[in-house]
Image (cartoon, helix red, strand yellow):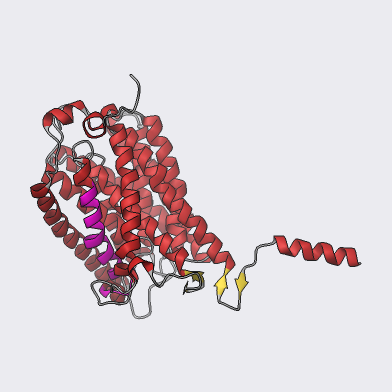
Amino acid sequence: MSKLIWKLAALSMLLPSTTFASDGLNGANTAWILTATALVLMMTLPGLSLFYGGLVRVKNILSILLQCFAVTCVASLLWLFVGYSMAFSEGNGFVGGFDNILMGSVTEGAMVGDIPESVFAMFQMTFAIITPALIVGGFAERMRFSSMLVFSGLWLLVVYAPITHWVWGGGWLYEMGLLDFAGGTVVHVTAGVAAVVAAMVMGPRHGFPNQPMPPHNMTMTITGAGLLWVGWFGFNAGSALAANGDAGMAMLVTHVSAAAGALTWMACEWTKFGRPSALGAVTGMVAGLGTITPASGYVGPGGALIIGILAGFVCYHATVFLKQRLKIDDSLDVFPVHGVGGALGTLLAAVFASAGLGVFSGQGLAEGMTIASQFQVQLIGVLASGIYTALVTFILLKLIDRMLGLRVSQDEETEGLDLTQHNERGYDL
């Protein structure tokens, strides 16, 4: 009997402890958010890097990979210095305060809910990393590396951090009751709008739209897309900040929307061209993921299915309209996929979060809110974040252009950014 007791005691030491009542820390929740943090960082390095890298021409592969890598470094340090404080410290309705510079109050024992504040701050850092990295796709193959670094850093501080505070840090949109579970406005609308503004300010790549500019390595792009799909589970399910039913449902609806978006985009291409493409499949997947993001904590599987189908259909036609009708060279389709998808998902959250839609019902709206009143709040959130982002992004780009010059010369663009900006090649040809 004594041997059995000792074996059970030893076994108990190997099992994870879920809750420490003495300091309020929940071990299960902490472990999940640590995992989700790693998943979200994987979305940028290497997920987005490979996804974008395969889409550009061979002469610019290293420039895209390095831009994503460098943005990760710059955003991480700025988030440490002041970004986290601006987003989540107590301030006013517009921006947080500056009393947590260098994360001075993030100590080993500091808590946010029942997880360490260090884990929460790091989780939010990964969102601050991928958002400016997404914008890279709008000006791919033509921006100076130095200008890209300055723009990304300033944009993080004057656009991303304030809007994060509006929505998640107790700001004015939070007080209005905006439903944005994981970043429809904070991440996707802001990145998409900034990308299209950058594309318009800088002008198209030389040869666009008459000269074909096909992806140089679709194998790389599909690999990156797969990493994005898996990483998005951390992005959306991690935003529950707990290992619970909300996280589980967010993961389920994320997957459903991604699959529906991919198949719908493929169907659109199949109908128009007689065959689907690998590029269309992965782009539709990303559209489904971006569109479900704001709604992922509020809708059910039925609603996610409709959201994914609409994401594939709407974002496909938005991409065609932007490039073929408007002739705007958003190089890697950031605005029609992320901007349009994020806005669409934010608006649809008001509909499919409702509890009165049968198999398409969600978790229910807040007390006193109807679909119409919630939709009004959602629309205000989309318009406010989009307009603010467009104005500030335009000003930043113009200032940087005057100080440093935004665009490489035509000869440098023709030769490729790998050699002209970094004196390296992606491949030994």
For image coordinates 80% across by 64% down, the residue present is 8
Residue 100 pos. (x, y %)? 34, 71
Residue at the extreme top of the image, as rendered: 429
User: Can residue 402 be seen in this snapshot?
Assistant: yes
Residue at the extreme bottom of the image, as rendered: 368
Q: Quadrant of residue 61?
A: top left
Q: How many circles with numbers are drawn on the protein?
A: 0
User: Where, quadrant-wise, is the N terminus in this rendering?
Assistant: bottom right
397 in relation to 209, above or below: below
Judged left or right of residue 347, residue 193 is left
221 and 158: which one is in front? 158
297 in relation to 325, above or below: below
User: Can residue 267 be seen in this snapshot?
Assistant: no
For image coordinates 26% across by 30% down, the residue present is 423
335 in relation to 173, above or below: above
357 and 81: which one is in front? 81
135 in relation to 216, above or below: below
Q: Is residue 373 magenta?
A: no
Residue at the extreme left of the image, as rendered: 402
389 and 247: which one is in front? 389
- Predominant SS along the magenta part: helix
User: Where, quadrant-wise, is the C terminus in this rendering?
Assistant: top left
Judged left or right of residue 219, residue 158 is left
Residue 211 pos. (x, y %)? 17, 26
Q: In the image, which residues are magenta? A: 149-172
